[in-house]
Amino acid sequence: MFTRADVEKLATVHVVQPAVLSLYLTVPPDPAELSGLLVRAGELMAAAGTDSQRVRDEDENWVLRTLATRGRGWLGRSVAILACTDAGLLEVLPLPSLVPERAVLGTRPHIRPLLGALQRCPAHRVVDRILAMVPSGLAAVGLPACLAAVNADAVETLVVPDEGLVPGYECGRCGALSTRSDSCPDWGAAPLPVPDVIEEMVTRTLEDGGQISVIGGGPPQIAAKLRFPLVQ
């Protein structure tokens, strides 16, 4: 079983171009179906790419070899496979519970499902506590408010959904995150595309010593408990 320290180590991986593959796959319980697993993995990896960015051949080949040689040991389980040869990242993490299948190609590993698997406190209780703090100014609710809180290094606990990607931008000067390419006054050059600002918010919160609570099985919710009120 992986630990929070393992996930936090993954959160430090960051490359300039979207080249980090995060593949979440459920291995069938019947060994006779393992050949179909390779086909499914290939389909997910193909769907994760775009016209300009695709999974590197060496990473795809490593994933397929790993599934072919080790898949029998994960029958009936979900497994996370993270690969970026250029960054020295080749990790396989069997999960304690089933998660939705997906493949994400980004500048960082997609770690929300891993954090959700480690989570012990019911997420809805965390959200209830955060919503109760809104009048005090020590809470932010919704993506714009939470982006502002992350940019200000004000987040103590960030609540995020386990599903969904939100593309956005990072300022090349101050590093501010946004869903718009024209929202930071520091941008003197073209902003840097970010494949998923939610994942970037998660990793920045962890780097800043904050906590993450992942919500699954419901409508997407993003909220944050703050260390200090933000100046409006």
Image: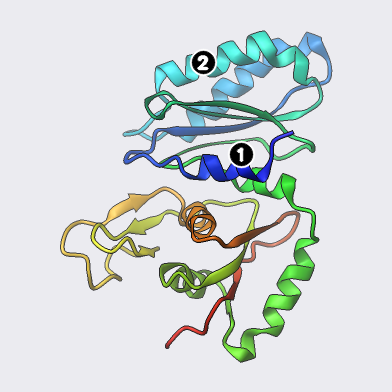
Say which quarter of the image contains residue 139.
bottom right
Secondary structure found at label 2: helix
Secondary structure found at label 1: helix
Q: Is residue 110 among the parts visible in the rendering? A: no
Left or right, 170 with reference to 44: left
Distance from disc 1 to disc 2, alpha carbons, whole Å, reads 21 Å
Say which quarter of the image contains residue 72.
top right
Q: Which residue is mark 2?
A: 62
Label placed on residue 152: none
Residue occupying the point 79% across, 60% down: 121
**Residue type at mark 2?**
Trp
Residue 189, above or below 102:
below
Q: Which residue is mark 1?
A: 6
Q: Position of residue 175 (x, y in %)?
A: 32, 60
Q: Residues within 10 Å of mark 2 (few under 14, many from 20)?
A: some
Q: Position of residue 48 (x, y in %)?
A: 49, 34
Q: Is residue 64 among the parts visible in the rendering? A: yes
Which quadrant of the figure contains the C terminus?
A: bottom left
Query: Which one is closest to the eye, mark 1 or mark 2?
Result: 1
Tally of numbered tags: 2
Left or right, 114 with reference to 124: left
Residue occupying the point 65% across, 8% down: 69
**Residue type at mark 1?**
Asp
Q: Nearer the viewer, residue 187 or 30?
A: 187
